[in-house]
Image (cartoon, grey):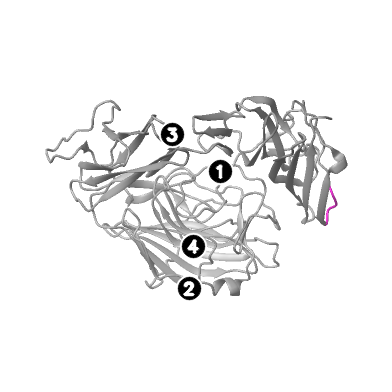
């Protein structure tokens, strides 16, 4: 199989909409990604679309082609479902929240203007006015976003794409009273400092910010605040939260510096009510331990020793700590010190191996080698659990779960978050092959794969900016042999280089047939920003190596 083109005799297009059909240009196998396109990654959003549709539906939520989430549920129906809780937490660190406190609105109209506008959607570093403790760190400055959150690290890319809180995806170190896409500022976004030590405070107000999700005659308008207290507590305050029809999804809560620990105050895509406040309380000083990642897994083969690295952080506030280490494992396992060679020893004389002293705010690592038995079968699996416990407070502990398994043969494809490349995995009981099929930072999505007579076809969607400076998403593919080696370079299956409207091809599906042909199905969404009109199409094509 060395050449694929469209068999247009059996190309099926189902279209509904207002703009008319725009057919993709068929490409020969030799045509690669055109130089007239400029790629964009997941951190760079195409322009907002006022009335998008997308098949990725989660309950009342719909995800749009540019990655935003909105709710299609009427306001009165959505508000009646599952009454929110009055309190929540604790998270691993110990934060809790309570929304039974009275609203204590602070007038910020005379405060300092952030300078935030829709075209300037974030600030540089702003002095808090006092040291503020947040999880295991202490900060003196913060950064404010148009989109209803602050962070203690620089905010890149605007981040109008909503995120569940907590989430390990950037941005992290976030306090989010109302994270949502915002289009306009009807009032202001200002901040104010007040109080005297040790009861100083810092407040940010988003006043009459406007969000137009779905082309309604009236847009949503919301006014809310976040107050940072010198004792480490946080208050969310909501004055007027007005919604009309469908609305952009929102979330509120806090998350730590890695987005691993945090509190969800308002469930993702649930509306936040007017005229109430939420107090997030910092826990008392305590010993703590954090393991990241807490869950690791990999495929293994008979007789192979799999090594797991376990990073350990002292997130407590009582100074240096030593963490006792215990292992539960059915397969032979051995603990190793941070050098990866020395057996983990008992450093404090209590007959239990430990990490040694870890300074407050510091980190170390240990290793666990797990021996796979020589007599294993497909499907055999094992989980070792490593428990680290604070010697300052034995009630403070975390577990690391380390899994190994003998796999059945399979192939998978994915976008690798570690490097941004499109990746291909071929796994069997005796071998695990990983292959990058693009360079790093490629940022494709929606990968699909099928096994053909001679190897594999790998299909995905990727975003570009075309020659008319419009955002597009194209369907691309590459061919690999049975050993996972590339036999045909990355090639566009669609091309919107001359499109005059926003054109999105995505969500491909692929299947191989016994005669060597391959079927590809994908979704198209077109949007004309000048008229607000849109169209949805389903495309199906046969790739035939005989043509």
Q: CA distance from mark 2 to mark 1?
A: 34 Å
Q: Residue furthest left?
A: 349
Q: Secondary structure at mark 1?
A: loop
Q: Is 381 positioned to the left or the right of 345 in the image? A: right
Q: Residues within 10 Å of mark 1 (few under 14, many from 20)?
A: some
Marked residue nearer the N-terminal end (3 or 4): 4
- Residue span colored magenta: 18-22
Q: Which residue is disc 4 drawn over?
A: 267
- x and y percentages locating residue 44 in the rendered image: 60, 42
Q: Nearer the viewer, residue 54 or 257?
A: 54
Q: Which residue is disc 2 drawn over?
A: 83
Indicate whether 426 appears above or below 249: above
- x and y percentages locating residue 240 in the rendered image: 53, 70
Q: Is 509 positioned to the left or the right of 431 in the image? A: right
Q: Nearer the viewer, mark 2 or mark 1?
A: 2
Q: Which residue is disc 1 drawn over?
A: 157
The disc label shown at residue 300, or none: 3
Indicate whether 340 appears above or below 398: above
The reply to whether callout 1 and callout 3 are in contact (CB within 8 Å) is no
User: Residue 422's quadrant in the figure?
Assistant: top right
């Amino acid at each position: 199989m060395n050449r694929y083109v469209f068999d247009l005799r059996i190309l099926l297009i189902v279209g509904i909409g207002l703009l008319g059909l725009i057919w993709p240009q068929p490409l020969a196998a030799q045509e690669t990604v055109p130089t007239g396109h400029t790629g964009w990654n997941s951190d760079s959003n195409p322009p907002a679309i006022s009335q998008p549709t997308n098949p990725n539906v989660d309950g009342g939520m719909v995800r749009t082609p540019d990655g935003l989430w909105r709710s299609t549920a009427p306001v009165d129906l959505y508000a009646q479902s599952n009454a929110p809780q009055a309190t929540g937490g604790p998270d691993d660190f110990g934060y809790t929240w309570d929304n039974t406190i009275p609203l204590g609105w602070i007038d910020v109209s005379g405060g300092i203007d952030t300078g935030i506008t829709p075209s300037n959607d974030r600030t540089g570093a702003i002095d808090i006015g006092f040291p503020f403790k947040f999880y295991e760190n202490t900060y003196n400055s913060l950064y404010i976003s148009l989109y209803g959150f602050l962070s203690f690290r620089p905010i890149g890319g605007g981040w109008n794409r909503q995120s569940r809180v907590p989430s390990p995806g950037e941005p992290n170190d976030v306090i989010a009273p109302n994270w949502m896409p915002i289009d306009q500022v009807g009032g202001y976004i200002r901040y104010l400092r007040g109080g005297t030590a040790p009861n100083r405070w810092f407040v940010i107000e988003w006043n009459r910010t406007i969000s137009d999700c779905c082309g309604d005659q009236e847009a949503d308008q919301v006014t809310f605040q976040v107050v940072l207290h010198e004792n480490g507590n946080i208050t969310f305050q909501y004055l007027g939260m007005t919604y009309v029809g469908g609305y952009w999804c929102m979330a509120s809560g806090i998350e730590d510096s890695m987005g691993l620990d945090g509190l969800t105050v308002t469930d993702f895509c649930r509306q936040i009510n007017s005229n109430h406040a939420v107090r997030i309380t910092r826990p008392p000083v305590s010993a703590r331990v954090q393991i990241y990642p807490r869950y690791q897994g990999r495929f293994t083969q008979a007789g192979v020793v799999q090594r797991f690295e376990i990073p350990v952080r002292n997130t407590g506030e009582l100074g240096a700590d030593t963490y006792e280490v215990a292992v539960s494992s059915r397969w032979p396992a051995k603990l190793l010190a941070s050098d990866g060679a020395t057996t983990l020893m008992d450093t404090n004389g209590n007959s239990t191996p430990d990490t040694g002293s870890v300074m407050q705010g510091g980190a170390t690592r240990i290793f666990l080698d797990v021996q796979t038995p020589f007599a294993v079968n497909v499907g055999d699996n094992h989980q070792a659990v490593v428990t680290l416990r604070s010697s300052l407070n034995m009630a403070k502990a975390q577990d690391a779960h380390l899994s190994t398994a003998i796999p059945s043969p399979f192939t998978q494809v994915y976008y690798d978050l570690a490097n941004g490349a499109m990746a291909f995995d071929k796994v069997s009981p005796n071998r695990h092959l990983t292959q990058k099929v693009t360079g790093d930072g490629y940022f494709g999505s929606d990968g699909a794969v099928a096994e053909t007579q001679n190897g594999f076809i790998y299909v995905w969607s990727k975003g570009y900016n075309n020659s008319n400076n419009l955002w597009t998403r194209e369907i691309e593919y590459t061919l690999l042999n049975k050993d996972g080696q590339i036999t045909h370079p990355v090639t566009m299956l669609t091309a919107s280089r001359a499109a005059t409207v926003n054109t999105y091809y995505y969500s491909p599906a692929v299947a191989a047939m016994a005669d060597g042909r391959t079927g590809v199905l994908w979704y198209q969404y077109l949007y004309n920003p000048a008229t607000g009109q849109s169209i949805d199409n389903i495309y199906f094509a046969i790739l035939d190596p005989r043509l």
